[in-house]
Image (cartoon, helix red, strand yellow):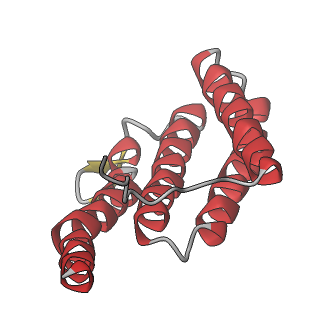
Amino acid sequence: MAANTDSLYTIPARFRRMENMHILFWLLKDISWCLFWKELGIAMIIPTLTIAIVISWRTRHIASELAHNLAVAFWISANSFWMISEFLGFDEQSVWMGITGKQLSLIPFIAGVLILLYYYLLQRPSEIREKHTTTL
């Protein structure tokens, strides 16, 4: 019988509780956006984004987790900016060279995608090569 050589990633319970609260805050933010509850939606940006950053910091020693958690933080930033642009009425207005307020949210969306592309195209192949050479 062959031994399982897969690594195991575990999350301490106190971190898991924070991640679960993160989901609750994120849902409240998006429900507020959907129902156009400006104050609550904007207020929920702070805990949602803060926890995303804390989770990224706590997983900084694991490249795959860091990349994905940073992408989530950028996603929340983009999503929050888009929500604010709708709440404040500049989502469809040209704010710079024909670019609308909503389209400006593409900046953090693209940042998140670039982080994941870097991880999957450069970092992950390097990790696989290292693992392969150390097992030989």
Question: Residue at left 19%, top 84%?
Answer: 133
Is residue 63 positioned above or below 74 on the image?
A: below
Q: Position of residue 111 (x, y in %)?
A: 34, 64
Position of the C terminus, as image quadrant, is bottom left
Q: Considering depth in this image, is 116 or 39 the residue closer to the camera?
A: 116
Q: Position of residue 75 (x, y in %)?
A: 46, 49
Q: Considering depth in this image, is 103 or 67 the residue closer to the camera?
A: 67
Write down the quadrant of residue 61 in the picture: bottom right
Question: Residue at left 52%, top 35%?
Answer: 89
Is residue 131 positioned above or below 2 on the image?
A: below
Q: Is residue 14 left or right of residue 58?
A: right
Q: Position of residue 73 (x, y in %)?
A: 53, 56
Question: Residue at left 51%, top 56%?
Answer: 8
Q: Residue pushed farthest right?
A: 14
Is residue 99 positioned above or below 23 on the image?
A: below
Q: Considering depth in this image, is 102 or 127 the residue closer to the camera?
A: 127
- Residue 7 appears in view: yes
Write down the quadrant of residue 129 in the picture: bottom left
Q: Is residue 133 left or right of residue 73?
A: left
Q: Is residue 127 left or right of residue 23?
A: left
